[in-house]
Image: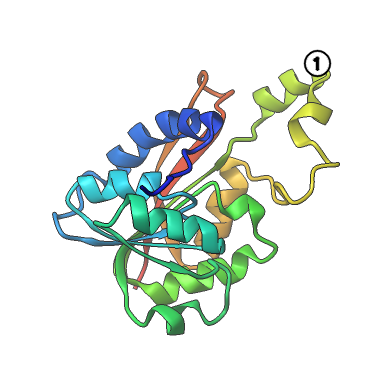
Amino acid sequence: MTNHKPPERGVLGYHSEILPPLKRLLSDLPDGSCILDAGCGLGHISGQISAMGFRVTGIDTSDEGIRFCRRTHPEASFLVASADNPKLAETLGRTFDAIVATEVIEHLYSPETFLRNCTALLRPGGLLILSTPYHGYLKNLLLALLNRFDRHFQPFREGGHIKFWSRKTLTGFLTLHGFQVTDYAGCGRWPWVWKAMAVRAVRTP
C-alpha cells in the first residue's frame, strides 16, 4: 500500500481561497485547452484544473513533490523543471493555451526570465494567470499600525518571499513584457486587505 503524504493544513486553506477566483479567470477557456501549472507544488491545483476539462502539465523543482503529483493526479502530466529556467521552453517543447502560476513569482530571483518563458510557451492570445500575496496602501498601513511587519515579512526565514508586488507594480511589469492585463481578483480576507491577488493577462501578438 502506497503511503501518500497529505498536504499541510495551511496549504489546503490557501487552496480554498485561491481556487474560486482562479476557476473564474479560467472559465471561458474551451474544454480540452492545454494549461501549464508552473510551480505546481503537490498538484492540488493541477487536479482541480484537470477536473474542469483541461489538459494539464505541471512543473516543479521538487523531485519528491513531482512523484507525489504523479501518484495522486494521474490524469495530468508532471515533470521536474523550474519556472525561471532560461531553457524551459526547449525542455517542454510545446506551447500552451494558458499558464497558471499560483504563489510563484514572489519566490523568483528573475521574474523577467519567467515572463520570457511565458511568452515563449504561450500561443498568441494565450492567458497568463498569476497569484501572489497582495500588498497595498491600506494593508501596509494596518500592518504598520498593528506592529505586524516583522511577522508578515519574516526576514530570518530561509528562502521564502523575495519580491513583493502591488497591483500597480505587477500590472506595469506584465505590460512591459508584452502582456495586457484584463482582470484582477482579491483572494481571502476582506477587500483591500486581501491575503493574495490573482491577475489575468493576455499575451499580445
Kindly identify the residue that appears in the image at 80 percent across and 36 percent down: 154
Q: Is residue 52 left or right of residue 100?
A: left
Q: Amino acid at mark 1?
A: Leu
Residue at (49% x, 32% y) in the render: 14
Could one spot residue 38 in this view of the protein? no
In the rendered image of this protein, does residue 171 appear above or below residue 125? above
In this rendering, the answer to whether 44 lies above or below 140 is below
Is 81 rendered above or below residue 193? below
**Apparent side of residue 32 relative to residue 126 in the rendered image (left or right):** left
Q: Identify the residue shown where x is 58% and y is 69%.
A: 84
- Between residues 150 and 115, which one lies in front from this camera angle? 150
Q: Is residue 141 above or below residue 24?
A: above
- Residue reaching furthest to the left: 31
Callout 1 secondary element: helix
Image quadrant containing the C terminus: bottom left
**Residue denoted by label 1:** 145
Q: Can residue 130 be seen at all in this image of the molecule?
A: yes
Q: Position of residue 108 (x, y in %)?
A: 65, 59
Task: Tell me if mark 1 has few (under 14), some (14-19) or many (20+) residues whose alpha carbon lies within 10 angstroms of its own.
Answer: few
Q: Position of residue 185 (x, y in %)?
A: 42, 35
- 161 vs 176, left or right, is right
User: What x and y, as percent, mark residue 48?
Assistant: 30, 43
> In the current view of this chain or complex, which residue is farthest to the top?
146
